Image: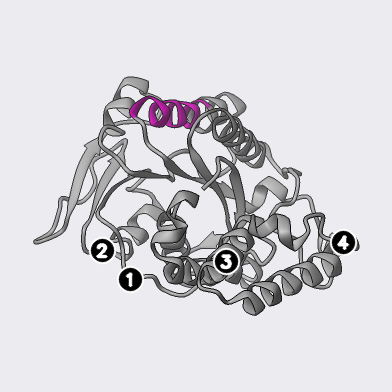
Amino acid sequence: MSTYVNTIDMKECDDMTDAPQERVLITGSGGNMGRMLRARLAAPGRTLRLLNRSPVTPAGPDEAVEIVTASVTDFSAVVAACEGVDAIIHLGGLSGEAPFEDILHTNVLGSHHLLEAARRQGVRKVLLASSNHAVGYFSRDDAPPDGLPADLPPRPDSLYGWSKTAVESLGRLYADTYPLDVYCLRIGSCFEVPFNVRHLSTWLSPDDSARLINACLSIIRRQDISKDPESIIEITNYIFYFDKLNEDALIYKCKSLILLKRHTLANNAYQKFSKEYKDIYGEDFGKPFHEIIN
């Protein structure tokens, strides 16, 4: 996969059960979302390294976890925690409004520590927990018929939301500068059940969160397309569930279909993407089919 940032609104996608051999670091593993994801992200061949500033629940019987007690603001500890890791899920930080100095120190500086540690340790994939508050001042009146797209420009509604736009920008910088795939997940209200009226619009179930994260973890780099094009097509279909205008997914899907000599299906996928692009943005998709598949 080329180096890029993919900003994702977290929606439904199906389960992915064939996880590769990997070690995944989860920061903020003792927080609300981290606790809910711990069991849901367990998979054969996967070890979860759980980092949290206070101790988390010890490993249970046959649970493949490693526990690290440290803060994301401690750079040397974060560098050590990233050693031998294949991917990182960065949930650590303040999860709501706070004084500016605290937001800056924990959310922005802590995320910089994480990205720089990943670069130094050769980690190739980082999932950054962003938030709907990064675009919270967009209103329903701003939305086209199919809703607001996943790649909205920043429009934060708070200092907390601003910190998430800063983290997304840091992710963009590291993805453009280094061989690092960065995904910014604009998380909604992730709880076991919605508990107020607003959550009826923003609720994200823990199961759907885990499915989306598994989809991100399972994305295969571009040079591996020829090894298993069927699996890549399946992965791109998961991606299109929550981001139907994901250009990278279109490229992967069309190239994989061409490898399987399914040229008509590849062209159909391109035409569908182009139509939805024009419906949402009011202009033609800028890349011709031959450019997508070459």
Residue 277 in the image: above or below residue 183: below
- Mark 2 or 3, closer to the camera: 3
Query: Marks 1 and 3, Cα distance to the nearest angstrom?
Result: 20 Å
Q: Which residue reaches farthest right?
A: 282
Residue 137 in the image, given as x and y percentages of width and height = 78, 50
* Quadrant location of the C terminus in the rendered image: bottom right
What residue is pinned by disc 4? 284
Q: Residue at x 60, y 68 (%)?
A: 240
**Label 4 near label 1: C-beta < 8 Å?**
no
What residue is pinned by disc 1? 17
Chain-order first, disc 2 or disc 3: 2
Q: Residue at x 44, y 45 (%)?
A: 91
What residue is pinned by disc 3? 253
- Mark 1 or 4, closer to the camera: 4
- Mark 2 or 4, closer to the camera: 4
Q: Secondary structure at mark 2?
A: loop
Q: Residue at x 53, y 66 (%)?
A: 256
Chain-order first, disc 1 or disc 4: 1
User: Which stretch did the figure color magenta?
Assistant: 109-121
Amino acid type at circle 1 is: Thr
Query: Marks 1 and 4, Cα distance to the nearest angstrom?
Result: 37 Å
| Foreground of the two, 247 or 16 | 247
